[in-house]
Amino acid sequence: MARSDRVRVAVLGATGYSGIETVRLLACHPLVELTVLTSEHYAGREVAAVYRHLKGLDLPSLEELRPGAVKGRADVVISCLPETVGASLIAGFISSGLRVIDLSADFRLRDPEVYRRVYKHEHPAPELLKEAVYGLSEFRRRELPEARLVANPGCYPTGVLLGLVPLLLKGLIDPSSIVVDAKSGTTGARRVPNVEQLFAEVNENFRPYKVGNHRHVPEMEQEISAILDREVAVMFVPHLLPINRGILTSIFLRPRAGTTADDIQAAFEAAYAKSSFIRLLSQGEMPELRNVRATNFCEISFVLHERSHTLCVITAIDNLGKGAAGQAVQNLNLMMGWDENAGLLNIAPVP
Amino acid sequence: MARSDRVRVAVLGATGYSGIETVRLLACHPLVELTVLTSEHYAGREVAAVYRHLKGLDLPSLEELRPGAVKGRADVVISCLPETVGASLIAGFISSGLRVIDLSADFRLRDPEVYRRVYKHEHPAPELLKEAVYGLSEFRRRELPEARLVANPGCYPTGVLLGLVPLLLKGLIDPSSIVVDAKSGTTGARRVPNVEQLFAEVNENFRPYKVGNHRHVPEMEQEISAILDREVAVMFVPHLLPINRGILTSIFLRPRAGTTADDIQAAFEAAYAKSSFIRLLSQGEMPELRNVRATNFCEISFVLHERSHTLCVITAIDNLGKGAAGQAVQNLNLMMGWDENAGLLNIAPVP
Amino acid sequence: MARSDRVRVAVLGATGYSGIETVRLLACHPLVELTVLTSEHYAGREVAAVYRHLKGLDLPSLEELRPGAVKGRADVVISCLPETVGASLIAGFISSGLRVIDLSADFRLRDPEVYRRVYKHEHPAPELLKEAVYGLSEFRRRELPEARLVANPGCYPTGVLLGLVPLLLKGLIDPSSIVVDAKSGTTGARRVPNVEQLFAEVNENFRPYKVGNHRHVPEMEQEISAILDREVAVMFVPHLLPINRGILTSIFLRPRAGTTADDIQAAFEAAYAKSSFIRLLSQGEMPELRNVRATNFCEISFVLHERSHTLCVITAIDNLGKGAAGQAVQNLNLMMGWDENAGLLNIAPVP
Amino acid sequence: MARSDRVRVAVLGATGYSGIETVRLLACHPLVELTVLTSEHYAGREVAAVYRHLKGLDLPSLEELRPGAVKGRADVVISCLPETVGASLIAGFISSGLRVIDLSADFRLRDPEVYRRVYKHEHPAPELLKEAVYGLSEFRRRELPEARLVANPGCYPTGVLLGLVPLLLKGLIDPSSIVVDAKSGTTGARRVPNVEQLFAEVNENFRPYKVGNHRHVPEMEQEISAILDREVAVMFVPHLLPINRGILTSIFLRPRAGTTADDIQAAFEAAYAKSSFIRLLSQGEMPELRNVRATNFCEISFVLHERSHTLCVITAIDNLGKGAAGQAVQNLNLMMGWDENAGLLNIAPVP
């Protein structure tokens, strides 16, 4: 496509982990032109001077974030800014007619009270909460084409919901018992100076954190409750894996009486019949993080353990792919009415 | 202690991962003399020619395993041979008056029928099954001093039972729902040529395996059922971590109505009041694998999640330490009537 | 391009590390159709059943290697078979009119005596040695379009020669002193069962091996000597890095009297003016393995250390990329007269 | 030994990487009592609240560094403070009659002009430079018993000098060509917030840094020049390894005409005849980092490559062991006239 016909995209916070992955994906997207890249720390430098793996690509220089300078140069804004930093700016972009995909948690929770409880301050733009589309792409194909503001889901909620929603929709499980044990690579944390994330603190180590009180839990519970039309509580245990990328999620559920493995398989097949990025595995196959690395794919399998009346669903995503930048690009594709897969069908480098 | 007064120990299968860790520990044990070290692959060589980190120690050469050559030169045999290889030899050692600690699974299951179902062949020495003491040290201090044959627990069962038994003994949980999500370093697998364990297959990867059907499950269920005097079923999901050593285990339970965090804390404190190797963590602290690396320690903490009526107990051990060689040495200490901690109070190298 | 107009390629030994990387690259190549994939271990299975990251691609099933079955179904053969296994088959392919790119060392050494000395047996097809083109792509652009047989360079020689040849061509260094210190990820070794390559043997470890006597040395020396028209000896020290992919190579040289940093910079710029895959770094920048991961790029920089009269040239490649499969595809492109970059401009996934 | 007869040691900067390793070693030292532990960030807390692997040991609480509070409570000060922070304090300790081992670079360079050039500021206590003993233990056994101030060598210089000094002393090499290629684990850098040391920046990566201009070079050159009584220049290339601990160092040298492998072997054997911590390897054996992990050992081997007239000496140490805390304890032992090995003969945990 001629460059002038491409949709112009600004990436805010382009040099963090999800920001630079968004740049990597969009630099090769056939229908997009990256026109604005902002960075608090590296403004004034070339992208390739900070991230040399992007050398040779025709990218704009990194610049400070000035909202006025974004309007007029971009059609869509993808914000990789941290929580609260971007929220009030985003309201301005929306009112100027830009469409926005926000990778922060700011617009994921629909209830400003819940937001205040979780993030300990008032929501900066509560008027937008109702409008924002929660961009779990596979289940929002109808809303996304019209969306002005997309709240890109959190990495953990993505891993949980992709394994859970099809079962909820078919009523196959008892929602009073949802236990999730998740393991994430380190790029789930921000790229900021931090002793806890130093190599020697993470390598040859493995540990849970924020057991039962991670900020992503209200997001999961909101989406699950909305489907079931009742309050649910999720017990969520995240862990820090000594790898760069990937989230493997085990979801332990009580199947409703009479639920068979065929029912479960059928629920997944129905939900994902049109989904290129969901890899439903065969009986006996298990998700592996390496198979989704640096991609937008999600692997899903399950074991129905009759002896303990437990259903275990396991999903694997790349936290920077389907868990962040990949899903953002997928949402962009859907917003624009493009092929959902455009720019996203790269293959994981294995090993 | 004068060398001649020391107890003479033979380590069979001394060059596998648990074997060489046993050698490392006993080489510094003040009451033990290593007199026989056998190795199928390296017989005839010095230990230090295979494992140079043991250079400079006064160790016997590696030799072929000939039972006749063990008798008369050792008082205790620690067998690190694989399943079934050692079982019939062990019967011979016992009848010759040697005491034996077996790190394989051969004598852990008391019912030969269960053994046949799990291992797909007849048990080689079923007459010893009743006598064997299941060596979960903290709970067998009474039986071990008289034991002729100790079945050293599996690494996964150790991580599960140390977190579970105190609660079972106090009747604090509903045994109809026991879900375990465990993550193990790679030395849990044997040191044999194997494509699945090559560095490039494990590194930057993470995957579950044998979901719901791992061979260690009958062992866990046997021990739990024995305490409760009823059949229980455990849903067990193990994973392969890209680290050398360590097992982190999350145990998800339904607390009985009325159970408080104080009840749980009290149960752990009562069970482990005399246990040097159990580190009960404070509220808010979480186990980390690095804190138990290369030691016999076990870290334990728990979260009682009221909203979901779920109790999550988390334990961390070194699979080669408390999960194998460390516990074997602890059992040796208890068998001999020595200080339970002898030779075992080394500090984890962190980082 | 219509599928029927594409060049048909057979990959032999498609399920080893370099084989599957070749498949990954060619599966997305716009001018190639993969028609034959052979595998000794996995014949009869789908590729995606062995390597799930390739699921969803339209690939032929894995089959046994029967030369007769390759002829007629392929125009070009890329052989990822081990040394000597493929050599005699290749002669047959050539005489049947197929063109061959061989990733083994079989056709890299032009002198069958040297081959016999290094590999301890007679060369299986010595008549082809003179014809084979040593496929260091950047320096064989003229010969490759006519080549029937391309000997794809070894991974270590590629890392050395890309940093050395421009300097040799300009006569900037004293060839009597060439010292190379190289560090390779583990996929440089074959994907076969091997205790030395188990995760726990490589992780948290680092070690040199075959110091001064690695099999790749005669290959380096042959190419260097050919340029200089005199015998040279290289001191080569390889190491095993605990990472999956990548070779970082330090080359220590004595610059000829009067050689300046500008001379060296100019030599590199002249040699690589038309080379998309060579990234000459700026003063002060240093190669990093992650920047070339899963790509065909090579990063090069140098430091002229006046105080010690030493020139240090450092290069970084992916051993499976520019060091094997990537360079094979680049050579294919050049053989076919296509754009040298076709199918190869993917971006490294960083981090 | 009765606690009251032990030597009282203060560790300043006890919660950095080398500080906490010093604490780990001295906590088990039979002749030492740790009486003061200071920490800028964690003052007021228990050691075990910061580093749980030290739980259960009888250690003083962490406190702010107040020099007056150290005097009177300690006989020896081991300073793990960063460059310049400790230097002026140390002068005060010395004048108060305490003996000091300083792990920073402050007292390693004897010439204050060189210090100013390297560290860009005036030396804080130049009057002590002449008195300070450079604590490369194996070569300072005579000076250390009288030393008031020991400058503990840098980690890189230790790896270099242990491989080089025996050859210099025997005049076996041409000092006009000394090239060093070294690879260090990440605990060589300080434990402070730092984006470059985040896990995802280091893992699956490998890179050189400060090529030819690392701050440790003047230290190496000073020690080499002192032995040879002439100026020498070292070309030094350090790299960052994705492991926690360890430095592997390759030293490339020109042997003097006529030097044989036997000469070199003899030089090493003579130099290290009484050294428990130096492991001279046999022909064909190569140093590995894992064999020295968490210990004070140094492995050394060499290859005399006749074809290229190059001698390659390779050493392996733990940068926190022989490269920092281990050597500090060894120096303490020598200062006190104790067994040089006291508290240091622990075995590396392999794997």
Image: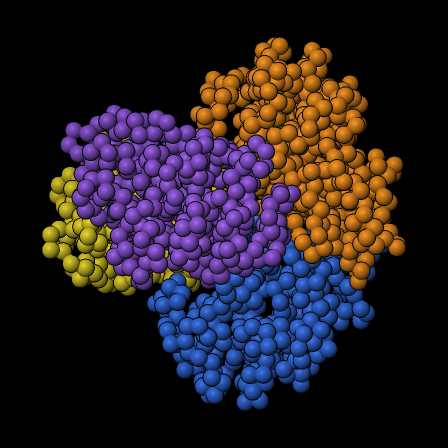
Chain colours: A yellow, B purple, C blue, D orange
- Residue B157 x %, y %: 33, 45
Q: Nearer the viewer, residue C325 or D47?
A: D47
Q: Residue at x 77, y 64 (%)?
A: C233
Q: Nearer the viewer, residue A219 or D22?
A: D22
Does residue D326 appear left or right of residue D301 in this picture? left
Q: Residue at x 26, y 47 (%)?
A: B222
Is residue C328 visible in the rendered image? The answer is yes
Looking at the rendered structure, the number of numbered marks drawn on it comes to 0
Rendered image quadrant of residue A69: top left
Q: Is residue C204 above or below residue B342?
A: below
- Residue A9 x %, y %: 39, 50
Q: Residue at x 21, y 55 (%)?
A: A304
Q: Residue at x 69, y 56 (%)?
A: D284
Residue that sits furthest to the bottom in the current view: C96
- Residue A116 x %, y %: 26, 29
- Residue A257 x %, y %: 11, 52
Question: Which image quarter holds the N terminus of chain B?
Answer: top right
Residue that sits furthest to the left in the current view: A258
Q: Nearer the viewer, residue C168 or C150?
A: C150
Is residue C151 visible in the rendered image? The answer is no
Q: Nearer the viewer, residue A220 or C212?
A: C212
Q: Is residue C68 above or below residue D50?
A: below
Does residue D105 appear left or right of residue D112 in this picture? left
